[in-house]
Amino acid sequence: MTTVLDRSDVASVPPAAAAGPVVAAAACAVVGAVASASVAVGRPVGPAVLGLYLLVPGVLLLSLRPAAASRYALLVPAVGLATTIACGSLALWLGLWAPGLLTVLAGAAVVVVSVRTVLRRRSTLIGWGGGRRRLLRGPVRPSRTTSAVAVCLAVALAAWVVAVLGALDADARAGGLLAVVGWPFGIAVAAGLVGFGLALRAGRTGLASLAALVLLVVVRGTGTLASSVPVYHWTYKHLGVVDLMQSRGSVLGGLDVYQAWPGFFAGAAWLSDASGIAAIDLARWTTPALELALGLAVAALARALGGSRDVAVAAGLVAVVVNWVGQDYFAPQAVAIVLATAVLALVVDREAPRSAAWAALGLYAALVVSHQLTPYWVLGATLLLTLVLRRRWWLPAAMAALALGYLALHYDAVAHYGIFSGFGDAVQNARTTIGVDPSDQQRLDSTVARAAALAVWGSAAAVLAVAALRRREGWVITAIVAFSPFALLLAQSYGGEAVLRVMLFTVPGCAVAIAGAVVALLRASWVRFTAGVVWLGLLAAVCAQATYDSWFLDRVSEAEVRTSRLLLDEVPGDAYLSAAVPRWPDRATGAYAWRLEDQWDFDRSAYAIEAADLDFTSVVDAVLLERSIRSSAALPTYLIFSDAMDAYADYYGLYPPGTLDRMRDLLVTRSGWDVVLAEDGVLVLRYLPGGLTDTPAATWRAR
């Protein structure tokens, strides 16, 4: 509520534009000092070190160039990610792995630069009372909008807490995680969306940003808190690469494709060593952290495309809500989409200074060394945007030189994948790899996933079609950003994952397109306001279900992680570490490297050999499995079972129902097999082909 004060209640307020850079520089100095000093004494303060690498570079750059702060503050996390990737990658390539030393030096340098900035601009603080005067009378009562939004957000957070508590240690259920969190999760999302809509309707951008942050926590934080370790078994391959880089301090050329594109892994290893935070803990919180970075980058893209601050906030929220495809975990593509969005935001900004193009090129360089596919989408999109915008012709040429030059240097690492093996066959390249006879639940979940994709693409396409019919400025540029990723399907299938990458890459552009229409509805009549909230709610519902429908299959237990690490690190000599089905957190430590060098298929699954055609209804099938093991390199074989594998095999139709139970029962009592470990739903059997009883791996026992 607006009130009038008498003179005694007048407060002096400094101009924010003038004081902002000084405050930012001072904050950087504090972070740099804490990070440097704590690492120097051997007790790193993790949050300060993370801030030093992920936030300070961007903030400090903006404090040095305050004129650009209002336009590019949203890209601070992207700059931090690129900086971290640069530090880690250069250290690996040069063989100078010293995160602690560089952190001490970097923190000290930040303090020096920040203090100089503060001293140079101290005049903005000397006249603190000379700024614009604002009349305030206490107590100041919040407006009705503020009160309504506050109630909505309080309800959202309270319901979310109930939802998370119900998800802790929950048993698997058809329908995935949402079937467990149920109505409290739905209330949390609905209340958050209503609060967000009310804030935008009143033009309260800051309040809308707070509501968007609450919704991010609700939508993306639920899965993180419901599991004590990172989800997705394939996450652990990435953790193994990080562990290898931490232990070696250099890349191991020729080992795998990750060594040729080390950016993401090098950055994660650098952050972990510098901060003292275990990589597995960084991985657990990757999803909400990178979703926040993506939301900010998409907001910057919306601003660059001419959107208002309200549209930018809405675009960031929509991006978080509709990013359902499960590519926001501890993986290169999760960082790549943030960097890609930041690059495109700088490319499309018509008012950007010339230096923005160089900044885009720097971010693009970090992208090139981090992911194999994303740089080529960004390159193609930039080329199209350059043709439309008719400026900076040199930028796509420079990008092409970076991407193609790097590919040429590392071509051997990807040649066997067949870069253009599916060229021109977009339909085939769009297919994913699933089991032979998937379950009804898997088919239903696939239908939900298709519905989510069509809802997002259809919404964006409809908005852009209306904009085209009304000849609104900028729709072509937005359409290029939103739908150019589909061109990737003309090249190859990317191991059955091309369509997943396309879904991920379309998120930023589609979010911007949808956001403009949503804001228009929220600002119109109450009927249209309701339609806007319902539209967001439907998108949130279908995308949340698509995100979490297979969550229990993706959840990894602590026992599985412990067992995987134990086998990798402690089983001596050559051995097969074979999961019954390809759903196991394998390669979870750097020890995978020497095993991979000695035996390229050391972690092949039983499903990958003849067991895929067996149902273990008789002892003959056990004999056939043993024959398959002996027919390859005859090595001691550790066959791994877990409770989660049964559900995974049934879900994807890898085996007839009950096959894994029968396999276990047959092998446990069969001569030549013995139990080496059994705990918390994990069972490890060992098979010794004839003549191998005296090898190191044949006699090992878990301690």
Image: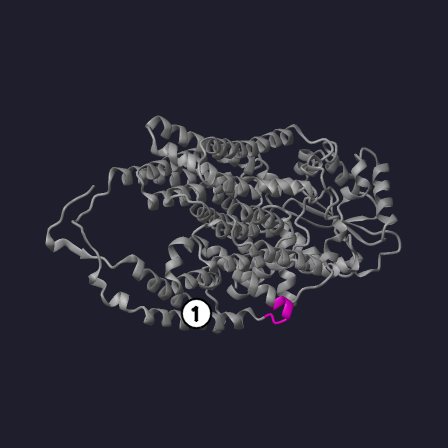
Residue at the image point whose x is 57% and y is 57% from the top? 394
Drawn side of residue 601 relative to residue 506, left or right: right
Q: Is residue 91 above or below residue 136?
A: below
Residue 183 is at least partly visible in this image: no
Which residue is at the front of the view, 243 or 658? 243
Quadrant of the rendered structure where residue 35 is?
bottom left
Q: Is residue 203 above or below residue 10?
A: above
Question: How far across and how far down the image is residue 550, in percent?
Answer: 59, 37
Question: How far across and how far down the image is residue 345, in percent?
Answer: 48, 50
Residue 1 is at least partly visible in this image: yes
Which quadrant is the N terminus positioned in?
top left
Drawn side of residue 506 relative to residue 564, left or right: left
Q: Amino acid at mark 1?
A: Val
Residue at the image point whose x is 48% and y is 40% from the top? 511
Which residue is at the front of the view, 220 or 408? 408
The span shown in magenta is 91-97
Magenta stretch holds residue 225: no
Determine the residue located farthest toward the top in the rendered image: 527
Which residue is at the front of the view, 671 or 317? 317
Q: How many marks?
A: 1
| Crowd class of label 1 (few under 14; some 14 to 19; many from 20; radius 10 Å) | many
Q: Is residue 180 above or below residue 106?
A: above
Which quadrant is the C terminus positioned in?
bottom right
Question: How far across and how far down the image is residue 405, in percent?
Answer: 67, 59
Magenta stretch holds residue 92: yes
Q: Mark 1 highlights which residue?
A: 110
